[in-house]
Amino acid sequence: MQGEEAVFNFKKIMERTRRAVFFGGAGVSTESGISDFRSEDGLYRQKYKYPPERILSHTFFTEHTEEFYAFYRDKMLCLAAQPNAAHKKLAQWEAEGKLFAVVTQNIDGLHQKAGSKNVFELHGSIWRNYCVRCGMPYPVQRIAAGSGVPRCACGGVVKPDVVLYEEPLDQSVLNGAVQAIRAADTLIVGGTSLNVYPAAGLIDFFQGDNLVVVNLGAPAKDMRGTLFIDGKIGQVLSRL
């Protein structure tokens, strides 16, 4: 469904919602100029010496750290990106007491930059970095401005606090996201094709009345009985 009728139905759902949760993916940030992964122009369709899926793995990070950081600085650090209409509307709903939490697969920190407070970052954040030897935090600005492999004063390698392939999700973040989704009366899924597991499996914990999906193209996961709007999440939320 799309167009005025779909947006009207979404608006009516939000009017009666008391505890909404938003679950979002890379499509939430494309309207801020950050590339997604699987679209026609996404990172996975671009040509590199190694496939991006391999570069963004734990094994590649440990065995080819310098090449990892060359890709990471070039494609993953979008420090100047600003929140778009979707981030701003979600922050507004939270401030109004209508939205309880944001569960995101993104690592760009744009939800917090827009003002959202209760954010579960399933895949971590580029804004947090730490020494793998001593645990010392390390500012992202030094990584962005540097070259080669960033190292701590102790000599240890600095690693972004992002979940790479082959790494598990943070259990406390995962538990918090599950609890939030389970307690929601409305779940809004936006900007994600629901291809990435285990994150996409969190949708199964929703027990509320209203499930709204906003995405360019139908999601991979079959969710019958939902309100599906084929469109960009920022453009849709700006109309509510």
Image (tube, rainbow, N blue to C red):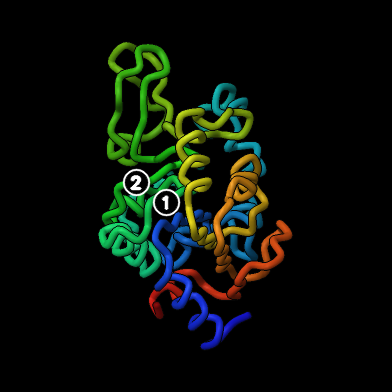
| Screen quadrant of the N terminus | bottom right
Horizontal side of 61 relative to 237 (left or right) equals: right
Percent position (x, y) of residue 239?
40, 80
Q: Whole-percent x and y of residue 215? A: 58, 68
Q: Nearer the viewer, residue 171 or 204?
A: 204
In the picture of the structure, the residue carrying the numbered disc 1 is 102
Q: Inspect this view and state whether residue 49 appears.
A: no
Tags 1 and 2 touching, CB below 8 Å: yes
Q: Quadrant of residue 141?
A: top left
The residue beneath circle 2 is: 118
Tell me the CA gap for discs 1 and 2.
6 Å
Q: Which mark is residue 23?
A: none
Q: Residues within 10 Å of mark 2 (few under 14, many from 20)?
A: some
User: Considering only vertical position in the picture, is 130 above or below 78?
Assistant: above
Nearer to me, 17 or 8 = 17
Instruction: Check the image and report above or below for 235 versus 178.
Output: below
**Which amino acid, by three-letter code, is at mark 2?**
Asn
- In the picture, the quarter occupied by the C terminus is bottom left
Residue 149: x %, y % from top left: 42, 27
Label 1 amino acid? Val
Q: Residue at x 40, y 12 (%)?
A: 133
Q: Residues within 10 Å of mark 1 (few under 14, many from 20)?
A: many
Q: Is residue 136 left or right of residue 211?
A: left
Which secondary structure lies at badge 1?
strand
